[in-house]
Amino acid sequence: MAFEDLAVGNVYNMIADYMGVSVGTAAVILAIISIWALVWKGFALWKASKKNSIIWFILLLVVNTLGILEILYIYVFSELGRRKSSKMPAKKK
């Protein structure tokens, strides 16, 4: 593959040919996937910042997983601290 083949238009054509769809359909699929990942990333980053989870915030900001890591953080890892703290008995004054 030559460097000229990697122009944006050619990449869309290659992806569309590989998927067996038109270039417009490939662009719509790519847009849907991008929006999906952006929504989950935004929600996970917001939740990590509210919980002051700096390590998770940086990890979520840097790693792109199409929303998989973000969904895991929102529903699994961010809830671990809440479950542990809810099982602790209340301190007496």
Image (cartoon, rainbow, N blue to C red):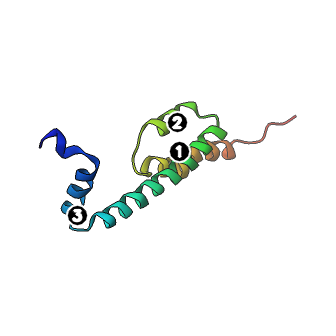
Percent coordinates x, y for residue 83 in the rendering: 62, 47
Q: Is residue 68 above or below residue 93?
A: below
Report the disc number at residue 77.
1
Circles 2 and 1: CB atoms closer than 8 Å: yes
Q: Is residue 55 left or right of residue 24?
A: right
Disc 1 marks a residue whose amino acid type is Phe
The residue wearing badge 3 is 19
Between the C-alphas of marks 3 and 1, the distance is 35 Å
Report the disc number at residue 18.
none
Foreground residue among 12 and 85: 12
Nearer the observer: mark 2 or 1; the answer is 2
Percent coordinates x, y for residue 76 in the rendering: 52, 49
Q: Secondary structure at mark 2?
A: helix
Percent coordinates x, y for residue 4 in the rendering: 18, 42
Foreground residue among 89 and 71: 71
Percent coordinates x, y for residue 87 in the rendering: 67, 46
Q: Is residue 26 left or right of residue 5?
A: right
Q: Residue at x 22, y 52 (%)?
A: 10
The residue wearing badge 2 is 56
Q: Is residue 22 left or right of residue 40?
A: left
The disc, 2 or 1, on the residue closer to the chain's N-terminal end is: 2
Q: Residue at x 18, y 46 (%)?
A: 5
Disc 2 marks a residue whose amino acid type is Trp
Q: Residues within 10 Å of mark 2 (few under 14, many from 20)?
A: many
Q: Residue at x 28, y 48 (%)?
A: 8
- Kindly indicate the quadrant of the structure image that contains residue 45: top right
Q: Secondary structure at mark 1?
A: helix
The disc, 3 or 1, on the residue closer to the chain's N-terminal end is: 3
Quarter that holds the N terminus: top left
Disc 3 marks a residue whose amino acid type is Met
Q: Residue at x 52, y 36 (%)?
A: 56
Q: Residues within 10 Å of mark 1 (few under 14, many from 20)?
A: some
